[in-house]
Amino acid sequence: MTQFRGAFVAIVTPFIDGKVDEQGLKDLIEFQIENGTHGIVPCGTTGESATMSHEEHHRVVEITIKTVNGRVPVMAGSGSNSTAESIELTKHAKEAGADGALVITPYYNKPTPDGLYAHFKAIAEAVDIPIVMYNVPSRTSVNMLPETVARCAEIDNIVGIKEATGNMNQVSEVIRLCPDDFSVLSGDDFTCMAQVAIGGNGVISVISNVTPNDMASMMDAALAGNFDEARKFHYKMFPLMKAMFIETNPVPAKTTLELMGKIKSSTPRLPLTKMSEANTAKLKTVLSDYGLI
């Protein structure tokens, strides 16, 4: 039985005047669960983990776990480009009661395949929690090759990977080389249905922030092998998937949530800035067509 499957939301972190909006985060979690999301991922890229202090990171993970209260799995983002820091954040995730940890490949350092293996092995040995690796070369400048993924998959508590290359060739090789119970989750909304079709297990989604119900329904249909139904959702959501990336993620998602009245402020942490007026106008058209505003 695959441990993690379905539509997990890479949940945004709302800020007001630069501080974490704790009530806003709780409200977003309730919105997600009410609308059928299969799991919640706090402190990922979409949650702006890179600009959070450790204290804030810990607090967001703790609030998420307490608010979710066992209703769906929580996979806490706990990666860094420092192995020691990743271990510290992963230890905290376990102590706080997370069901798993999402650990990104080290960014900026550009480790070799041996370095990547040693990084994940060190974390897995230090913290007994299910670990999902995260490969997103567009943000880290390092691509974790399928052979390295398969090597890591032999470690007991490394249970899956979030694959965000958008490359079905690479994803196929990961699925072919890894054990049947290893979760292969898409890190790109636009590839997630196709990835399930070739043997993937779900998605860690940006678009789930704004339309959790439709993404969960698409994953339910795809995982049940009902691709006619899944395809309808894919093409319904496709313009929205593109709109979520007209500026750097999570700026469009946060702007959408503010326009929907789900958060009080869409302002991200610097160096990200609020969405330009021109792009906001484009976004509003897509959201209006979708029926979200």
Image (spheres, grey):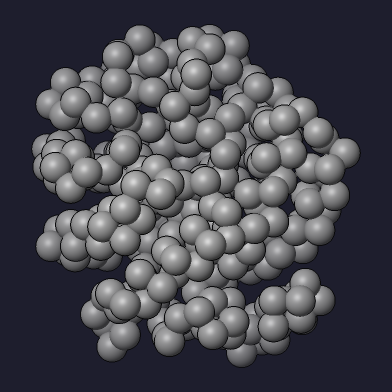
Towards the viewer: 70 or 210: 70
Residue ID at (76%, 57%): 238
- The quadrant in which the C terminus is found is bottom right
Determine whether 156 is above or below 162 in the image.
Answer: above
**Residue 62 shows in the view:** yes
Q: Position of residue 51 (x, y in %)?
A: 27, 65
- Kindly indicate the quadrant of the structure image that contains residue 14: bottom left
In the rendered structure, the answer to whether residue 123 lies left or right of residue 27 reads left
In the rendered structure, the answer to whether residue 49 lies left or right of residue 187 reads left
Towards the viewer: 208 or 170: 208
Q: Position of residue 203 (x, y in %)?
A: 56, 41
Residue ID at (44%, 66%): 30
Residue ID at (24%, 80%): 19
**Residue 242 shows in the view:** no
Towards the viewer: 51 or 189: 189
Towards the viewer: 259 or 174: 259
Determine whether 220 is above or below 160 in the image.
Answer: below
Q: Position of residue 24 (x, y in %)?
A: 37, 77
- Count of picture labels: 0
Task: Identify the residue at the far right of this view.
Answer: 228
Q: Position of residue 133 (x, y in %)?
A: 38, 32
- Kindly indicate the quadrant of the structure image that contains residue 111: top left
Residue ID at (50%, 79%): 262
In the rendered structure, the answer to whether residue 228 lies left or right of residue 5 reads right
